[in-house]
Image (cartoon, rainbow, N blue to C red):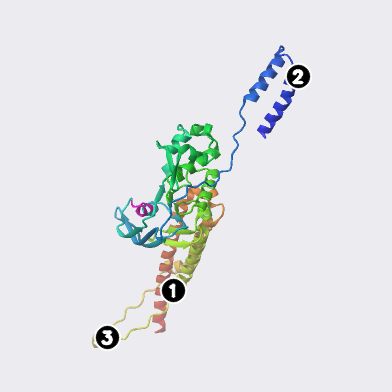
Amino acid sequence: MIEHKRQMFLKKELAWVRQGPRAQRSKQKDRFERYYDTAAQAGPVVEEEVELVIPPPPQLGNRTVEVSNLGMELGGKKLFTGFNYIFENGHRIGVCGRNGLGKTTLLKIIIGQLAPTEGTVKTGQLTKFNYVDQGRLQLNEERTVLDEVSDGTEFVQWGESKISVRSYLKRFLFADDRILTQVKKLSGGERSRLVLARILKSGGNFLILDEPTNDLDLPTLRVLEEALIAFPGVVCVVSHDRYFLNRVCTDVLAFEGDGKIHHSVGDYDYYLEKKQKAAVASVAASRQSAAIVPLKKSPPSKSAAANPVPSKTKPRKLSFKEMHELAGMEAHIQSVEAEIARIENLFAAPDFHRKHATQTNELMAELESEKKNLTKLFARWEELEALKASVTDAKAG
């Protein structure tokens, strides 16, 4: 709209200038100066749609990466154990879970930067990794576009051949004059294309990204998503961004804090759905087991028959406090279950990342705490029911 007004002003003033008025009066002089100043202004940078110009990755073999009984311990803490998985061509794997459970450690084991404490990693001969950490996604505002991508080299590997860095940047729609422009002077769309160019420059057929969404704006994310979906190799990405995982992933590897890495086929929403159903089934099973069946009395041993105990210890009755606790136990359990469902519904909501992205770790910790609380409540309920049942049995006997 602003550019349209500028063009309309120039069109009107150009007609006036062509009439040949003399710039003698101050008002006419000011009008001339305003026209030439406006005409000299550069129009807005037109954002072009970037084509998905992904460097052709080298061909993958029959084996990419295969892990068997993988386990890792750091600083005396066992992060995970017994992990088995085969990474196959075409898979886009999302790795999720709260911080500190070993997600980045797993990536470093896969690429060979760390040795596991147990299990093996078998990498195919044709597998070439491209590991992108958060530092690779940050741009130096003072450097030029050329410097940001070249890093002192003149060529970029493009499939089986090499092309110059300038030619490479032109494939990301950078014209000659923009290639030497400082990063701080780039438009939003140009920055998006530059980040993408940096990521894909290293090539490889097994692309690994660690938290790629943390410092990227929305346009950059959309371009990155499309690039990953079109990538003809293996993609493995760590992220807390639910929408990003839904858009990109074919599989999910979830770190749930129990020392296991859980595999789920499908996107992140489907993983949450299955997890919620499993939680409901677990609660139902716990409730069923809470109904205590009185134990059958075992026959007395011979020694006991020879030396009968003169008096029998009476079962302890529930105290008033315990009776009150038992009476309110079911309502307490339902309250905790409702809180668990509330938090899980937050994670499943389409607008979770927009509304609660900064609370992801806090909500995950709260969910874990509530689940542990629920387990304790069921155990306590079972204990009180057992006491109550033992008194009833004694009276019946």
Q: Nearer the viewer, residue 389 or 56?
A: 56
- Residue 297 versus residue 202 in the image, above or below: below
Camera-near label (1 vs 2) is 2
Magenta residues span: 107-112
Q: Is residue 332 visible?
A: no
Secondary structure, mark 3, is: loop
* Numbered badge on residue 19: 2
The amino acid on which the numbered mark 2 sits, given as a three-letter code, is Gln
Asked whether, in this view, residue 274 is left or right of residue 103, the answer is: right
Q: Nearer the viewer, mark 1 or mark 3?
A: 1
**Quick one: label 1, few (<14), some, or many (20+) residues within 10 Å?**
few
* Lower sequence index among marks 3 and 2: 2
The mark nearer the N terminus, 1 or 2, is 2
Q: CA distance from mark 1 to mark 2?
A: 96 Å
Looking at the figure, which quarter contains the C terminus? Answer: bottom left
Q: Residue at x 59, y 40 (%)?
A: 48
Residue 42 at x, y = what percent? 61, 28
Residues tagged 1 and 3 counted as in contact (Cβ below 8 A) = no
Residue furthest to the top in view is: 24
Amino acid type of the residue that numbered disc 1 sits on in the rendered structure = Ser
**CA separation in Å, label 3 and label 2:** 124 Å
Between 109 and 162, the residue placed more toward the observer is 162
Residue on which disc 3 sits: 301
Is tag 1's residue or tag 3's residue first in the polypeptide sequence?
1
**Residue extending furthest right?**
19
Q: Which residue is mark 1?
A: 289
State the image coordinates of residue 202 (x, y, percent, origin top left).
42, 45
